[in-house]
Image: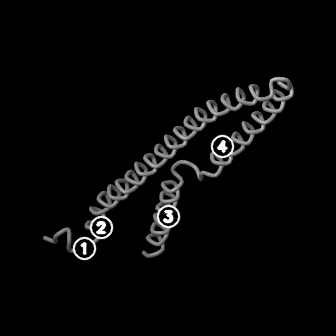
Amino acid sequence: MRSASGGGPFAALKSIPITLLTMAQTRLQLLGNELLTEKNLALRQLSLVLAMVACAGLGLLLAVVLALSLLWEQRVLVLSLLSVLFLGAAAGCYAALRRTTRSSEGVFASSLAELQEDLRQLKAAAEHGQKSP
């Protein structure tokens, strides 16, 4: 009797499930790493946005009260200028936030690239297997 480690077509067939399971495990680990990375990025962005909004809101409120106190006679002009300034700052923050969301390369990009490479290699191996009788 021949052992499975001795070679031959049956030994190769027996190793296919092990290879497939190993590939699946690697891909799942990569997927888990990508999920963790994306979650951490989203939480960091959310906490920064919340801190920015809280600090900016309090700072702006205090700045408006100070400007109105100092320039009470020109309060309409001061409120108009500050409103334009705040709306411009909000538009700038919105544009910056849009840039950060567009710059990411997409969720699971590494996993998809690895799966495409696996598929390419499997197709190449299948074509090679069909050519040799």
Q: Give the image location of residue 9, x and y in percent.
A: 30, 69
Dot 3 amino acid type: Lys
Q: Position of residue 35 (x, y in %)?
A: 45, 46
Secondary element at image label 1: loop
Q: Residue at x 46, y 64 (%)?
A: 122
At mark 2, the secondary structure is helix
Identify the residue position indicated by label 2 in the image. Answer: 12
State yes or no: discs 1 and 2 in contact (Cβ < 8 Å): yes
In the picture, the quarter occupied by the C terminus is bottom left
User: Mark 1 and mark 4: span between their CA atoms?
Assistant: 58 Å
- Residue type (three-letter) at the residue carrying disc 2: Ala
Alpha-carbon distance for marks 1 and 3?
Answer: 23 Å
Occupied quadrant, residue 19: bottom left
Earlier residue among tags 2 and 4: 2
Of circles 1 and 4, the one toward us is 4
- In the picture of the structure, the residue carrying the numbered disc 1 is 7
Which part of the image, by quadrant, shows the N terminus?
bottom left
Picture coordinates of residue 131 (x, y %)?
Answer: 48, 74
Q: Earlier in the sequence, mark 1 or mark 2?
A: 1
Question: Alpha carbon of mark 3 to alpha carbon of mark 4: how far?
Answer: 42 Å
Q: Are the residues at dot 1 and dot 4 in contact (C-beta closer than 8 Å)?
A: no
Cα separation between marks 2 and 4: 53 Å
Amino acid at pointer 4? Leu
Q: Which residue is mark 4?
A: 97
**x, y percentage for residue 110?**
50, 57
Asked if marks 1 and 3 touch (Cβ < 8 Å), the reply is no
Q: Residue at (31%, 57%) from the top-left corner?
A: 17
Q: Is 82 placed above or below 120 here?
A: above
Helix or strand or loop: what does disc 3 sit on? Answer: helix
- Residue 75 lies, with reference to residue 46, above or below; the image says above
Residue drawn at (54%, 48%) of the image: 107
